[in-house]
Protein backbone atom coordinates (compact mmCIF):
# COMPACT_ATOMS: atom_id res chain seq x y z
CA UNK A 1 0.00 0.00 0.00
CA UNK A 2 0.91 3.69 0.04
CA UNK A 3 2.96 3.33 3.20
CA UNK A 4 5.71 5.90 2.54
CA UNK A 5 5.99 9.37 1.03
CA UNK A 6 9.42 10.36 -0.25
CA UNK A 7 10.26 14.04 -0.74
CA UNK A 8 13.89 14.28 -1.81
CA UNK A 9 16.01 12.78 1.00
CA UNK A 10 13.04 12.84 3.40
CA UNK A 11 10.83 9.76 3.84
CA UNK A 12 7.57 10.02 5.75
CA UNK A 13 5.63 6.98 6.94
CA UNK A 14 1.96 7.44 6.16
CA UNK A 15 0.79 5.85 9.41
CA UNK A 16 2.82 8.20 11.60
CA UNK A 17 1.90 11.16 9.41
CA UNK A 18 -1.84 10.51 9.76
CA UNK A 19 -1.54 9.96 13.53
CA UNK A 20 0.28 13.28 13.78
CA UNK A 21 -2.30 15.06 11.62
CA UNK A 22 -5.07 13.53 13.74
CA UNK A 23 -3.55 14.88 16.95
CA UNK A 24 -3.00 18.31 15.40
CA UNK A 25 -6.55 18.46 14.02
CA UNK A 26 -7.99 17.43 17.39
CA UNK A 27 -5.83 19.96 19.23
CA UNK A 28 -6.77 22.76 16.80
CA UNK A 29 -10.47 21.97 17.22
CA UNK A 30 -10.20 21.97 21.03
CA UNK A 31 -8.17 25.19 21.01
CA UNK A 32 -10.75 26.90 18.78
CA UNK A 33 -13.66 25.77 20.94
CA UNK A 34 -11.83 26.72 24.13
CA UNK A 35 -11.31 30.26 22.88
CA UNK A 36 -14.88 30.45 21.63
CA UNK A 37 -16.16 29.39 25.04
CA UNK A 38 -13.80 31.92 26.69
CA UNK A 39 -12.24 29.28 28.92
CA UNK A 40 -9.47 30.86 30.97
CA UNK A 41 -5.97 29.67 29.96
CA UNK A 42 -7.54 27.01 27.71
CA UNK A 43 -4.55 26.99 25.36
CA UNK A 44 -1.98 26.21 28.09
CA UNK A 45 -4.19 23.60 29.75
CA UNK A 46 -5.03 21.93 26.44
CA UNK A 47 -1.34 21.75 25.56
CA UNK A 48 -0.72 19.89 28.81
CA UNK A 49 -3.70 17.59 28.26
CA UNK A 50 -2.41 16.93 24.73
CA UNK A 51 0.86 15.48 26.07
CA UNK A 52 -0.89 13.69 28.93
CA UNK A 53 -3.16 11.99 26.38
CA UNK A 54 -0.17 10.85 24.33
CA UNK A 55 1.83 9.51 27.28
CA UNK A 56 -1.15 7.99 29.10
CA UNK A 57 -2.47 6.62 25.83
CA UNK A 58 0.76 4.85 24.90
CA UNK A 59 1.02 3.24 28.34
CA UNK A 60 -2.70 2.41 28.50
CA UNK A 61 -2.83 0.62 25.13
CA UNK A 62 -0.14 -1.77 26.32
CA UNK A 63 -1.40 -2.30 29.87
CA UNK A 64 -4.94 -3.21 28.78
CA UNK A 65 -3.47 -5.63 26.26
CA UNK A 66 -1.52 -7.31 29.08
CA UNK A 67 -4.68 -7.53 31.19
CA UNK A 68 -6.89 -9.15 28.54
CA UNK A 69 -4.12 -11.47 27.33
CA UNK A 70 -3.03 -12.82 30.74
CA UNK A 71 -3.70 -16.49 29.77
CA UNK A 72 -1.53 -16.12 26.63
CA UNK A 73 1.22 -14.31 28.57
CA UNK A 74 1.33 -17.15 31.12
CA UNK A 75 1.90 -19.58 28.24
CA UNK A 76 4.43 -17.33 26.50
CA UNK A 77 6.02 -14.60 28.71
CA UNK A 78 7.98 -13.24 25.73
CA UNK A 79 4.78 -11.40 24.75
CA UNK A 80 5.61 -8.91 27.53
CA UNK A 81 8.57 -7.48 25.63
CA UNK A 82 7.33 -7.99 22.07
CA UNK A 83 6.36 -4.43 21.12
CA UNK A 84 5.75 -5.00 17.41
CA UNK A 85 2.06 -5.58 18.14
CA UNK A 86 -0.27 -5.97 21.08
CA UNK A 87 -2.01 -2.66 21.63
CA UNK A 88 -5.64 -2.09 22.64
CA UNK A 89 -7.07 1.23 21.44
CA UNK A 90 -9.47 1.58 24.34
CA UNK A 91 -6.62 1.14 26.77
CA UNK A 92 -5.14 4.26 25.21
CA UNK A 93 -8.36 6.20 25.74
CA UNK A 94 -8.61 5.05 29.37
CA UNK A 95 -4.93 5.81 30.02
CA UNK A 96 -5.17 9.22 28.40
CA UNK A 97 -8.24 10.09 30.47
CA UNK A 98 -6.65 9.03 33.78
CA UNK A 99 -3.41 10.94 33.21
CA UNK A 100 -5.35 13.99 31.98
CA UNK A 101 -7.53 13.84 35.10
CA UNK A 102 -4.42 13.82 37.29
CA UNK A 103 -3.02 16.77 35.34
CA UNK A 104 -6.24 18.77 35.80
CA UNK A 105 -6.17 18.00 39.53
CA UNK A 106 -2.61 19.31 39.77
CA UNK A 107 -3.52 22.43 37.79
CA UNK A 108 -6.72 22.88 39.85
CA UNK A 109 -9.01 23.22 36.84
CA UNK A 110 -12.30 21.49 36.09
CA UNK A 111 -11.56 18.10 34.54
CA UNK A 112 -15.20 17.68 33.48
CA UNK A 113 -15.19 21.01 31.65
CA UNK A 114 -12.06 20.17 29.69
CA UNK A 115 -13.07 16.57 29.14
CA UNK A 116 -16.32 17.83 27.65
CA UNK A 117 -14.21 20.00 25.36
CA UNK A 118 -11.86 17.22 24.28
CA UNK A 119 -14.14 14.19 23.80
CA UNK A 120 -15.61 15.13 20.37
CA UNK A 121 -12.09 15.69 19.05
CA UNK A 122 -11.04 12.17 20.10
CA UNK A 123 -13.31 10.80 17.37
CA UNK A 124 -11.70 13.19 14.86
CA UNK A 125 -8.21 11.91 15.77
CA UNK A 126 -9.43 8.30 15.50
CA UNK A 127 -10.71 8.99 11.98
CA UNK A 128 -7.30 10.24 10.85
CA UNK A 129 -5.60 7.31 12.58
CA UNK A 130 -7.65 4.75 10.66
CA UNK A 131 -6.60 6.31 7.36
CA UNK A 132 -3.04 5.67 8.50
CA UNK A 133 -3.95 2.06 9.28
CA UNK A 134 -5.41 1.65 5.79
CA UNK A 135 -2.22 2.80 4.08
CA UNK A 136 0.06 0.89 6.48
CA UNK A 137 -1.86 -2.37 6.07
CA UNK A 138 -2.61 -2.87 9.76
CA UNK A 139 -5.92 -3.49 11.57
CA UNK A 140 -7.16 -4.98 8.30
CA UNK A 141 -10.67 -6.23 7.58
CA UNK A 142 -12.01 -9.76 7.28
CA UNK A 143 -11.77 -11.87 4.12
CA UNK A 144 -14.11 -10.37 1.54
CA UNK A 145 -14.29 -10.50 -2.27
CA UNK A 146 -17.19 -8.15 -2.92
CA UNK A 147 -17.24 -4.56 -4.20
CA UNK A 148 -14.56 -2.36 -2.64
CA UNK A 149 -12.37 -5.25 -1.49
CA UNK A 150 -8.64 -4.57 -1.18
CA UNK A 151 -5.52 -6.71 -1.22
CA UNK A 152 -2.18 -6.19 0.53
CA UNK A 153 1.03 -7.80 -0.62
CA UNK A 154 3.19 -7.54 2.49
CA UNK A 155 1.24 -8.10 5.70
CA UNK A 156 -0.19 -11.00 7.71
CA UNK A 157 -3.05 -11.41 5.24
CA UNK A 158 -0.90 -10.92 2.13
CA UNK A 159 -2.60 -11.85 -1.12
CA UNK A 160 -6.10 -12.18 0.31
CA UNK A 161 -9.02 -9.98 -0.61
CA UNK A 162 -10.17 -8.05 2.44
CA UNK A 163 -12.96 -5.76 3.59
CA UNK A 164 -11.80 -2.09 3.86
CA UNK A 165 -12.85 -1.82 7.51
CA UNK A 166 -10.35 0.99 8.23
CA UNK A 167 -12.11 3.31 5.77
CA UNK A 168 -15.52 2.39 7.21
CA UNK A 169 -14.18 3.20 10.68
CA UNK A 170 -12.86 6.54 9.39
CA UNK A 171 -16.27 7.47 8.03
CA UNK A 172 -18.13 6.42 11.20
CA UNK A 173 -15.70 8.19 13.54
CA UNK A 174 -15.96 11.39 11.52
CA UNK A 175 -19.75 11.15 11.74
CA UNK A 176 -19.41 10.54 15.49
CA UNK A 177 -17.23 13.64 15.72
CA UNK A 178 -19.86 15.77 13.96
CA UNK A 179 -22.62 14.38 16.21
CA UNK A 180 -20.69 14.92 19.45
CA UNK A 181 -19.50 18.35 18.33
CA UNK A 182 -23.07 19.39 17.64
CA UNK A 183 -24.17 18.08 21.05
CA UNK A 184 -21.34 19.98 22.73
CA UNK A 185 -22.21 23.19 20.87
CA UNK A 186 -25.79 22.90 22.09
CA UNK A 187 -24.49 22.21 25.60
CA UNK A 188 -26.39 18.95 25.95
CA UNK A 189 -26.00 17.20 29.30
CA UNK A 190 -24.24 13.86 29.57
CA UNK A 191 -21.94 14.23 26.56
CA UNK A 192 -19.05 12.49 28.36
CA UNK A 193 -20.77 9.15 29.11
CA UNK A 194 -22.54 9.30 25.75
CA UNK A 195 -19.19 9.80 24.00
CA UNK A 196 -17.57 6.84 25.74
CA UNK A 197 -20.58 4.62 25.17
CA UNK A 198 -20.75 5.59 21.49
CA UNK A 199 -17.05 4.82 21.01
CA UNK A 200 -17.45 1.47 22.78
CA UNK A 201 -20.39 0.42 20.62
CA UNK A 202 -18.70 1.47 17.38
CA UNK A 203 -15.45 -0.30 18.19
CA UNK A 204 -17.16 -3.44 19.47
CA UNK A 205 -19.31 -3.89 16.34
CA UNK A 206 -16.61 -2.92 13.83
CA UNK A 207 -14.15 -5.35 15.39
CA UNK A 208 -16.26 -8.23 14.03
CA UNK A 209 -15.28 -6.96 10.56
CA UNK A 210 -11.57 -7.24 11.40
CA UNK A 211 -9.25 -9.99 10.20
CA UNK A 212 -8.20 -12.50 12.87
CA UNK A 213 -6.42 -15.76 12.12
CA UNK A 214 -7.72 -17.24 15.37
CA UNK A 215 -11.02 -15.43 15.97
CA UNK A 216 -12.12 -15.69 19.60
CA UNK A 217 -15.54 -14.89 21.08
CA UNK A 218 -14.24 -11.44 22.00
CA UNK A 219 -10.97 -9.85 20.87
CA UNK A 220 -8.71 -7.79 23.16
CA UNK A 221 -10.26 -4.61 21.72
CA UNK A 222 -13.78 -5.89 22.39
CA UNK A 223 -12.94 -6.73 26.00
CA UNK A 224 -11.77 -3.14 26.33
CA UNK A 225 -15.06 -1.91 24.84
CA UNK A 226 -17.07 -4.06 27.24
CA UNK A 227 -15.05 -2.76 30.21
CA UNK A 228 -15.74 0.85 29.22
CA UNK A 229 -19.44 0.24 28.44
CA UNK A 230 -20.09 -1.51 31.75
CA UNK A 231 -18.22 1.22 33.64
CA UNK A 232 -20.26 3.95 31.95
CA UNK A 233 -23.57 2.19 32.59
CA UNK A 234 -22.67 1.61 36.26
CA UNK A 235 -21.63 5.25 36.62
CA UNK A 236 -24.91 6.45 35.10
CA UNK A 237 -26.93 4.08 37.30
CA UNK A 238 -25.19 5.34 40.47
CA UNK A 239 -25.62 8.95 39.36
CA UNK A 240 -29.35 8.43 38.75
CA UNK A 241 -29.79 6.78 42.16
CA UNK A 242 -27.98 9.65 43.91
CA UNK A 243 -29.99 12.23 41.99
CA UNK A 244 -33.30 10.61 42.98
CA UNK A 245 -32.16 10.36 46.60
CA UNK A 246 -31.25 14.05 46.62
CA UNK A 247 -34.61 14.98 45.10
CA UNK A 248 -36.43 13.04 47.84
CA UNK A 249 -34.43 14.80 50.54
CA UNK A 250 -35.31 18.18 49.08
Image (cartoon, helix red, strand yellow):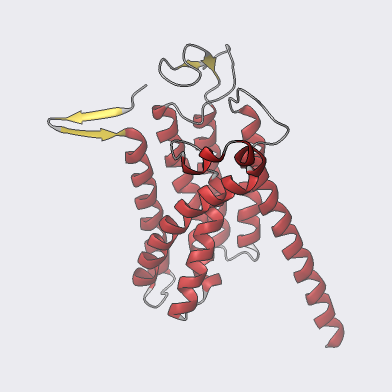
Q: Residue furthest left?
A: 8
Q: Is residue 12 above or below residue 45?
A: above
Q: Residue furthest bottom?
A: 250
Question: Closer to the camera, 38 or 232?
Answer: 232
Can residue 10 be seen?
yes
Q: Where is residue 143 drawn, in percent x and y? A: 59, 17
The number of numbered badges drawn on the structure is: 0
* The quadrant where residue 37 appears: bottom left
Residue at 46 percent of width and 42 percent of height = 81
Question: Closer to the camera, 232 or 95?
Answer: 95
Q: Where is residue 145 drawn, in percent x and y? A: 57, 11
Q: Where is residue 137 drawn, in percent x and y? A: 43, 26
Q: Is residue 240 left or right of residue 118?
A: right
Residue at 37 percent of width and 21 percent of height = 1
* The quadrant where residue 211 appears: top right
Q: Where is residue 29 drawn, in percent x and y? A: 40, 56
Residue at 75 percent of width and 70 percent of height = 239
Q: Is residue 138 above or below residue 222?
A: above
Q: Is residue 194 left or right of residue 154?
A: right
Quadrant including the C terminus: bottom right
Residue at 49 percent of width and 30 percent of height = 167
Can residue 203 be seen?
no
Amino acid sequence: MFNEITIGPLTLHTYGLMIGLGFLAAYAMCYYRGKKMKMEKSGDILYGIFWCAIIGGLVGTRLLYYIVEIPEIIKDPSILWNFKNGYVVYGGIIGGILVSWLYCRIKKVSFIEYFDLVMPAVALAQGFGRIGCFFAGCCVGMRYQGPGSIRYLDNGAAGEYLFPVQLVETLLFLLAFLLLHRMAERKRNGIIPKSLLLYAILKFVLDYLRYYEDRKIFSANQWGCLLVAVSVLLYEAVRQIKQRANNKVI
